[in-house]
Image: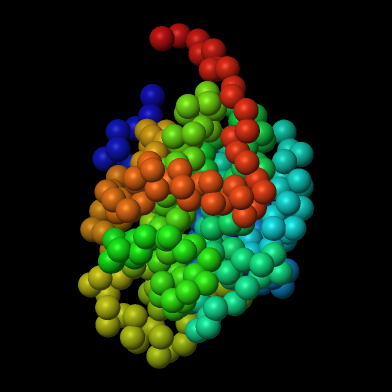
Amino acid sequence: MSAPRDQWNPTSLPSQAGRVFLVTGSNAGLGYFASEQLARAGAHVVMSGRNPNRLAAARAAIGRRVPDASVETLLLDTSNLGSVRAAAASVGGRDRLDGVLLNAGIVHPPRTREVTGDGNELVLATNVLGHFALAGALLPVLERADTPARMVWLGSLSTAMGSYDPVDPQLEENYSPWRAYVQSKVIVQALGFEADRRLRSRGFAVRSLVAHPGYSVSGRTPGIRGVNEPTRGSRFVDNLQAAVTQSKERGAWAPLRALLDPDAEGGTFWGPKGGLKGIPRVARPAALTSDPERGARLWAFCEEVTAVQWPSYRKAPRRRSGR
């Protein structure tokens, strides 16, 4: 039986030996620490990122800190749909994949609107469209897991700060860095909840959850060569906010609980107990992101832009032994 929720210990994860997870944006920040914590728990981790040098540095760091870690690297640029297809094809040929943490993203958008080679606004492409296409392409291999696999979408507290209803997802008008970031996270959360509704309605065992890291900053995070090297000034400023911030190492706790806790249900939202920092628990998402009508509208938009439709077929419910 699984442990009661109040016994969950993020510093001592249950054994993940024999399980395989993919983490996007593994070379730094939340993605790196999620990868390290998974590896420390015995999982095999596919660390992905778009920069081969930074990815190699992150893998080497885990090797130093977790000597028996089982990790590999995978080049993946979520802003490039061609890169997403190639990475998905590589991972999709595996015997199993127990979960994917859709973490990669742009936190500090460019001052002026930029467009990718696919013709999409850069922040939308990186934070949203690449992950939508990746999750859909990985659905068959996720279904092969022994126990119901999970996809966890990385949301943000910023979704509750004002009304950023993404009626113009590509931000062809009224672009600003803040709007680009918040709208991307509104869409990510809406997709995460909509994915679980669709997967359930079509009989898939895979579950979709959403998590946010609270207010996690580099200056309160352990220094790791090639991964997290904040300046003295950055550490000073971030430590002044110690009452409301936490490290990115702890910021990874909520996404990992959503990914690993056997009691975590599909369609739920996870974050630090205190909102900004603390032990991970179920939280309440912004109403803007949990509305099924808006979720369906944004889903249709992503299908059209990425040319990826999922789940594309209905599965017969799995037969389960026992009660």
The picture places residue 161, in percent across and down from the top left corner, at 28, 66
Image point (45%, 56%), residue name: 187
Q: Can you see residue 43?
A: no
Residue sitting at x 53%, y 66%: 170
Question: Which quadrant, please, contains the N terminus?
Answer: top left
Residue at the farthest bottom position: 233
User: Is 173 drawn above or below residue 10 in the view shown?
Assistant: below
Indicate left or right for 320 with 79 as reference.
Answer: left
Q: Position of residue 7 (x, y in %)?
A: 30, 39
Q: Position of residue 139 (x, y in %)?
A: 62, 37
Question: Relative to the observer, which residue lies in front, 234 or 88?
Answer: 88
Name the quarter where the C terminus is drawn: top left
Residue shown at the point (27%, 82%) measured from the top left: 240
Percent position of residue 318, x then y: 55, 17
Q: Is any atom of residue 272 visible in this view?
A: yes
Residue 222 vs residue 290: left or right?
A: right
Left or right relative to 17: residue 294 = left
Question: 319 or 117: which is nearer to us?
Answer: 117
At 76% from the left edge and 46% from the top edge, which residue is drawn?
89
